Amino acid sequence: MLCRVSDEPGDALAIEEDGVNTLEQFVLARYYLTTQVIAHKGRRITDAMLVRGLKLGVQLDKIDFLRRLYTFRSDKPFIDEYVKWNDERLISRLLEPEHESTWAGRFMRRLAERRLFKIVFRRPVTDFPDLVLDANRVASIAGELENATAEILSVAPEEVVFKVHRSPPTRKSEGAVLISRSSGQLEPFEARSLIFKSIDLSLREEHFECYAPLITSDEQERRRIKSDISEILTKRIQELLRPVLAPGE
């Protein structure tokens, strides 16, 4: 279904018109891979716990080898040392008894024992249409929202992670995917495929998410706790991210 066409800059690779459905199968395959593997809730939580554990290991625990590893230098000794580390070596090192009482060590033990945090709050960003949302503002309020959640759960704020999640795009091509119509005209795949539009829109939807330990196994109690968290965080997000009005407005 691939064909060679003439475009303004020169020759280009395109898909024949009859190949749209074939291409959509690849989009569907990537969609299922994304939702069931790449952006699965277990993967999202695990990634967040790993990052938080390492961050605390550097900032609060001040673990010497972590500080050296995550303080970038452009010299050759730093690069040579950095490439010697992988996931297995890093986690094994933090699982050693000397790090048992550190934040980094505790997080790695939770990961190794599959004692993962739970999603205690999740709301689409579109539920807050009047808010001013950018990475800096979200980062600035995350600590306050984590503190509020920690108080409800009676856990340390360091054990609560608040973030904005968006799934990766359905395709990684840098340029437009062109469809060569029988008339000889070229049409972007995005304009032709209803499936791509729907899937791409779904994956691009952003969500506020909060992960934290949720110890109780009683389902009714879990729902009550999540309801309390949702009520408080929803109110605080609306307060903290409301538009900043200029004087006189």
Image: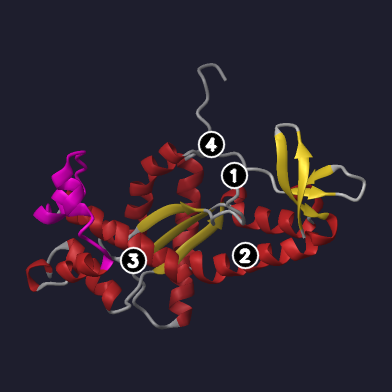
Kindly report the distance in space between the C-alpha atoms of the residues bearing marks 4 and 3. 28 Å
Residue 219, given in percent of the width and then of the height, sits at: 47, 81
Q: Is residue 63 among the parts visible in the rendering?
A: no
Q: Which residue is depicted at the point 17% across and 43% down? A: 76
Residue indicated by mark 2: 31
Q: Amino acid at mark 4?
A: Val
Does the magenta run of residues contain 16? no
Residue 213 lies in what quarter of the image? bottom left
* In the foreground, 162 or 222: 162
Q: Earlier in the sequence, mark 1 or mark 4?
A: 4
* In the foreground, 119 or 41: 41
Residue indicated by mark 3: 153
Q: Earlier in the sequence, mark 4 or mark 3?
A: 4
Residue indicated by mark 1: 174
Q: Earlier in the sequence, mark 3 or mark 1?
A: 3
Q: Which residue is depicted at the point 53% across and 32% down? A: 243
Residue 117, given in percent of the width and then of the height, sits at: 36, 69
